[in-house]
């Protein structure tokens, strides 16, 4: 890497020709330029497949051809012509492959055959589906208790696959459902359920056209939800305010050239995606919103004194809210000094943000991982909600709360029962459907599963997609512990590091991707369904020939394991495996909100699940929307690290060329980083205070006080526009530094955006 290549500044607009060139490169690089391009034309179309890139919503009307650069990457790399065939596995031992990078494994392409691990040769080799199912069933049935097995789900699984999976797992006898959502938006789900009685956002895509102000908090849509930029720039274009709260200056949140706008592309133009940009400290957002509340109350008091119209929505608060007085008292008791100290913003800046909030009739607030991956994330989401409730900004057109989900069906998986503590009403309905009783004990979430894997009580791991061992905190410790399991099974499209940590008995089961045609035994094409961040459920059917004739759909694979393990006494697994309509009928009987699911899903744009809070019906214990009166957090990582020159708060985030643990390329174009992922972004003055120079090689050490030594070696310092004392670098390389002992209160989400670290000169 040349020194001058890592520039770390955001000058040009996001999107534009850079995005189009990158699309071309991705299509060529994936080895499937034509298939990839043809496939893209069907993304997010009524008769096509749901883009596996992200969970941003699709318009409910119109037929706009919506795709984005990073959707293309996700699709192109699934439609790749590269194949990881049995010969590949014969040529490489698992120990050797463990030394490969995520990038190198991804580039071997699609898995083609079911594989079983042979410890004598340290290799994976082909096995028949029936042998695999039989041996997996034997291993599961040999456990002392079903709670010794961990059943992980990654959020790409369809509603049908996830529903079948939870049914199998509960009939097997456990609620152990570690889920990618535990590492992602769990805090949003918990906070919103407490506050407004539903763990989902309240807005629909159309609301963005009506909003006067949109607050975008701790989120990098330019990379992770690029289609959202189109909505943001349209909002700016019609005079709405788009207020960004982000620790970093992210280019996509300044300007965006829409690759789908031909005139603009020819003219080399671009448009703004935000009007106001604030850079709080890592973990400072609760303090920012507390400050906005203080300013709102001050404006209200002033309005009362001057006999002007009220700033608070008194009618809404009286009719719909509980806990207002206690909240007001807490806000009054929080000092501006504490707010400035914790947020890293000045009172004036926060008052500016508050003035925009107050002046807007309709406000939407969106957020993602910058809010949810801290210790105090639940109270932060509650504080965002508090502020929105003050002016009745929930449950009416053009306004509302919008946690922007990650994986394309992570919200749907939870809806259909992937939940270690599912509501009693759901278990009741499942029991009625099946006519047997199901386990009620709370199962393991991701941290629970990690604990059980580390202490040896877990004996089996099954992964429905994902890359568990690489996505979790303390990935180095987990990698060691995985090998001690009796059984590891991964249902996957592509080879990844989790597959290379085989238990005594280990299988890789290759499945169809969303872009591929899925036909049942009678040759009838099957579709699946997903739910986006706006509670819209739509169908998804692939158009490409399967990567290998051996592949099976996730639904068939789960039914196969279930039948071998449990028999067909309670559930006719073969019938469900062969007909996704039957699975949907079952879902609709258990969850009546799906209505006539099979008819609904065949409507061109799908349908919206009932969202109680959007209707101002509050399914909370008080039957009201609840204010929370939590104090600002104490002893934050920022407070613990601020006084030392070599200690920082580190956030781990995504580059522009990755999808979670999948690394497509080595560039992070918008942040000016090319050809490298082993980098740490720091303020220029912090680099100087370390006695270092930009581009110097450093080692990053955990400063957690739990006695465990954690180190990431050989990272390059990149100067960046980031508050002093804060650092940033890429996941999953830095997961060795994320302590599994530091997690969100109530959410148990690893605090991967506030890791205490020390930075030292690199030693070999
Ligand atoms: N192309 C692509 N798309 C994806 C993914 C992908 O990997 N690649 N992943 C998918 C998934 S599963 C998810 S969950 C989403 C993730 O979407 P994002 O949440 O956008 O993901 P991150 O890359 O973690 O970016 C976090 C952003 O929050 C900012 N931030 C970090 N900490 C703080 C803080 O304390 N306060 C504030 N105000 N800002 C902060 C960071 O600077 C960064 O801009 O994207 C989904 N879409
Ligand atoms: N340090 C740090 N850690 C993090 C995060 C962070 O910001 N920082 N983010 C967290 C977040 S938000 C999330 S959501 C998790 C993500 O954790 P995971 O969801 O476990 O990880 P992914 O990288 O999305 O999983 C990629 C793998 O999924 C498989 N796959 C892809 N498509 C399909 C499919 O259609 N079917 C099946 N069965 N398999 C498929 C492929 O084998 C691929 O290798 O990571 C979390 N970990
Ligand atoms: Mo996520």
Image (cartoon, rainbow, N blue to C red):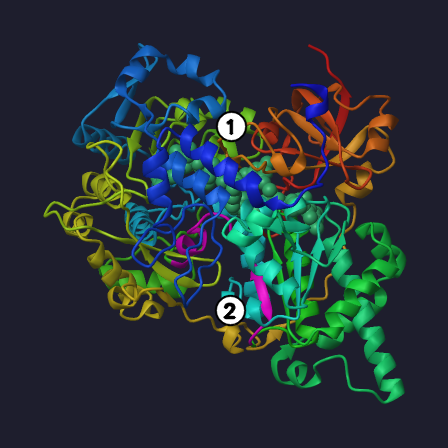
The kind of secondary structure element at disc 2 is helix
Quarter of the figure with residue 390: bottom right
Report the residue at 65% width, 62% height from top: 236
From the image, which quarter does the N terminus lie in?
A: top right
Report the residue at 30% width, 48% height from top: 161
Residue 66: percent from the left, percent from the top? 44, 54
Report the residue at 80% width, 35% height from top: 683
Q: Residue 478 bears which disc, if any?
A: 1
Tell me where the magenta segment starts and ends, as one range: 397-415
Vertical placement of residue 45 versus 300, above or below: above
Ligand 1 is found in which quarter of the picture?
top right
Q: Which residue is mark 2?
A: 206
- Mark with earlier residue (1, 2): 2
Quarter of the figure with residue 669: top right
Residues tagged 1 and 2 counted as in contact (Cβ below 8 A): no
Looking at the image, which is closer to me, 343 or 706?
343
Residue 28: percent from the left, percent from the top? 41, 30
Vertical placement of residue 19 versus 6, above or below: below
Q: CA distance from mark 1 to mark 2?
A: 43 Å
From the image, which quarter does the C terminus lie in?
A: top right
């Amino acid at each position: 890497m040349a020194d001058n290549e890592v520039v770390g500044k955001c000058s040009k607009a996001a999107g534009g020709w850079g995005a189009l060139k990158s699309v071309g490169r991705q299509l060529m690089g994936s080895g499937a330029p034509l298939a990839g391009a043809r496939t893209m034309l069907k993304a997010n179309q009524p008769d096509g497949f749901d883009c596996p890139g992200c969970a941003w919503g699709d318009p409910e009307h119109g037929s706009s051809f919506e795709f984005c650069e990073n959707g293309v990457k996700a699709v192109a790399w699934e439609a790749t012509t590269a194949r990881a065939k049995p010969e590949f596995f014969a040529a490489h031992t698992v120990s050797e492959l463990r030394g490969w990078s995520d990038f190198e494994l991804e580039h071997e392409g699609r898995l083609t055959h079911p594989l079983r691990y042979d410890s004598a040769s340290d290799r994976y080799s082909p096995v028949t589906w029936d042998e695999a199912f039989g041996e997996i069933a034997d291993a599961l049935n040999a456990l002392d208790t079903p709670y010794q097995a961990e059943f992980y789900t990654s959020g790409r699984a369809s509603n049908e696959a996830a529903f079948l999976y939870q049914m199998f797992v509960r009939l097997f006898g456990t609620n152990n459902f570690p889920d990618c959502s535990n590492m992602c938006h769990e805090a949003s789900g918990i906070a919103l359920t407490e506050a407004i009685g539903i763990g989902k956002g309240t807005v629909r895509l159309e609301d963005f056209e009506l909003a006067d102000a949109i607050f975008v908090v701790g989120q990098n849509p330019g990379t992770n939800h690029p289609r959202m930029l189109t909505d943001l720039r349209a909002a700016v274009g019609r005079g709405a305010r788009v207020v960004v709260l982000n620790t970093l200056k992210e280019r996509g949140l300044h300007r965006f050239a829409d690759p789908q706008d031909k005139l603009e592309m020819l003219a080399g133009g671009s448009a703004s995606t935000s009007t106001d940009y604030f850079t709080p400290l890592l973990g400072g957002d609760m303090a920012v919103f507390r400050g906005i509340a203080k300013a709102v109350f001050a404006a209200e008091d002033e309005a009362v004194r001057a006999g002007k119209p009220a700033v608070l929505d008194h009618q809404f608060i009286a009719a719909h809210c509980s806990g207002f007085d206690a909240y007001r008292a807490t806000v009054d008791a929080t000092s501006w000094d504490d707010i400035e100290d914790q947020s890293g913003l000045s009172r004036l800046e926060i008052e500016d943000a508050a003035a925009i909030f107050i002046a807007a009739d309709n406000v939407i607030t969106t957020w993602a991982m910058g809010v949810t991956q801290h210790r105090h994330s639940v109270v932060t989401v509650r504080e965002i909600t508090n502020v929105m409730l003050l002016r009745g900004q929930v449950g009416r057109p053009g306004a509302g709360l919008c946690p922007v989900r990650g994986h394309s069906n992570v919200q749907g998986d939870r809806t259909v029962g992937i939940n270690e503590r599912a509501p009693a009403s759901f278990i009741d309905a499942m029991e009625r459907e099946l006519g047997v009783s199901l386990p009620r004990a709370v199962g393991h979430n991701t941290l629970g599963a990690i604990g059980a894997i580390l202490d040896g009580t877990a004996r089996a791991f099954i992964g429905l997609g994902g890359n568990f061992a690489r996505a979790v905190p303390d990935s180095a410790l987990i990698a060691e512990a995985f090998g001690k399991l009796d059984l590891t099974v991964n249902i996957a499209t592509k080879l990844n590091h989790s597959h290379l940590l085989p238990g005594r008995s280990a299988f890789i089961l290759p499945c169809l991707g969303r872009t591929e045609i899925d036909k049942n035994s009678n040759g009838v094409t099957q579709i699946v369904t997903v739910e986006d961040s706006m509670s819209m459920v739509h169908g998804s059917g692939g158009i490409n020939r399967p990567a290998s004739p051996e592949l099976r759909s996730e639904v068939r694979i789960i039914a196969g394991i279930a039948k071998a393990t449990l028999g067909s006494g309670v559930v006719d697994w073969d019938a469900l495996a062969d007909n996704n309509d039957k699975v949907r009928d079952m879902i609709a009987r258990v969850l009546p909100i799906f209505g006539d699911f099979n008819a609904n899903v065949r409507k061109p744009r799908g349908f919206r699940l009932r969202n109680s809070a959007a209707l101002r019906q509050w399914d909370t214990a008080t039957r009201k929307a609840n204010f929370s009166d939590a104090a600002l957090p104490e002893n934050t990582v920022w407070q613990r690290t601020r006084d030392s020159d070599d200690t920082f708060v580190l956030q781990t985030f995504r580059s522009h060329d990755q999808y979670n643990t999948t690394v497509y390329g080595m560039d992070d174009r918008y942040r000016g980083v090319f050809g490298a992922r082993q980098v740490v972004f720091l303020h220029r003055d912090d680099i100087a205070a370390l006695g270092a120079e930009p581009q110097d090689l450093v080692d990053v050490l955990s400063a957690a006080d739990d006695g465990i030594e954690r180190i990431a070696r050989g990272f390059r310092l990149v100067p960046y526009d980031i508050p002093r004392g804060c650092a940033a670098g890429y996941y999953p390389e830095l997961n060795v530094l994320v302590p599994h002992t530091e997690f969100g209160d109530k959410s148990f989400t690893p605090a991967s955006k506030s890791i205490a670290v020390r930075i030292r000169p690199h030693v070999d």
